[in-house]
Image (tube, helix red, strand yellow):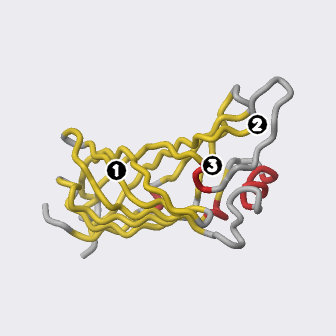
Amino acid sequence: MTVSKWALDKAHSSVDFSVRHMMISSVKGSFNEFSASIEADPSDLTTAKIEFTIELASVDTRNDDRDNHLRSADFFDVENTPTMTFTSTQITKKADDEYEVTGNLSLHGKTNQETFLVTFEGEGKDPWGNLKVGFSAEGKINRSDYGLSWNAALETGGVLVGDQIKVALQLQATKEA
């Protein structure tokens, strides 16, 4: 294949996260609104250009009170910083279909370099002849690196919300004409 533009298929993609709660369990959530600009050769992602944007107000943990707290100034402050963005800067092949994608992650007014493990899941044509590709990505970020430091101490020791956020993406894209 050659480098092509790919349109994100949001109906077949997801952006999920999890974080430790009370040091004894994990809370999972998703972002329902996101977009991407992808220029890539799926058979060799090392030359890809990837920009990804998440609308933070679309956070969904299946609990309205928690979601509203996450949107507030204690966490995302969506009125002042409505999006989280990622722009790739370096992509290194680790195995046949696995890559380390490093880039600049901007959240809550701060930008840090983060690396995610990305797997090319394959390609195929849909029933209408459109070429589709699939990718999965996972990684971890520390929310305190982005100034998201709200927390509450627990009577038994420890804190209410963990610092490390696990991120998991499932992405499907369609080759643009």
Q: Amino acid at mark 3?
A: Ser
Left/right placement of residue 90 relative to residue 53 reads left
Q: Would you say the residues marked 2 and 3 are in contact, meaning their CB atoms lie under 8 Å apart?
A: no
Estimate the spatial distance between the alpha carbons at disc 2 and disc 3, rounded to whole Å. Answer: 14 Å
Q: Which residue is mark 2?
A: 160
Image height of 38 relative to 117, above or below: below
Q: Residues within 10 Å of mark 3 (few under 14, many from 20)?
A: few
Q: Residue furthest top?
A: 156
Element type at mark 3:
helix
Q: Which residue is mark 1?
A: 135
Q: Nearer the viewer, mark 1 or mark 2?
A: 2
Estimate the spatial distance between the alpha carbons at disc 3 and disc 1, rounded to whole Å. Answer: 28 Å
Q: Nearer the viewer, mark 3 or mark 1?
A: 3
Q: Which residue is mark 3?
A: 144
- For marks 3 and 1 on the same chain, the one whose residue lies earlier in the sequence: 1
Left/right placement of residue 35 relative to residue 88 reads right
Instruction: Please tell me in which quadrant of the rendered image residue 47 appears.
Output: bottom left
Q: Would you say the residues marked 1 and 2 are in contact, meaning their CB atoms lie under 8 Å apart?
A: no
Q: Position of residue 152 (x, y in %)?
A: 81, 40
Q: Amino acid at mark 2?
A: Leu
Please tell me which residue is depicted at 43% across the width and 55% down the height of the picture: 113
Please tell me which residue is depicted at 33% across the width and 66% down the height of the picture: 38
Q: Position of residue 60 (x, y in %)?
A: 66, 53
Please tell me which residue is depicted at 22% across the width and 69% down the height of the picture: 4
Q: Position of residue 55 (x, y in %)?
A: 59, 66
Q: How many marks?
A: 3
Left/right placement of residue 168 relative to residue 172 reads right
Residue 20 vs residue 122, the one in the foreground: 20
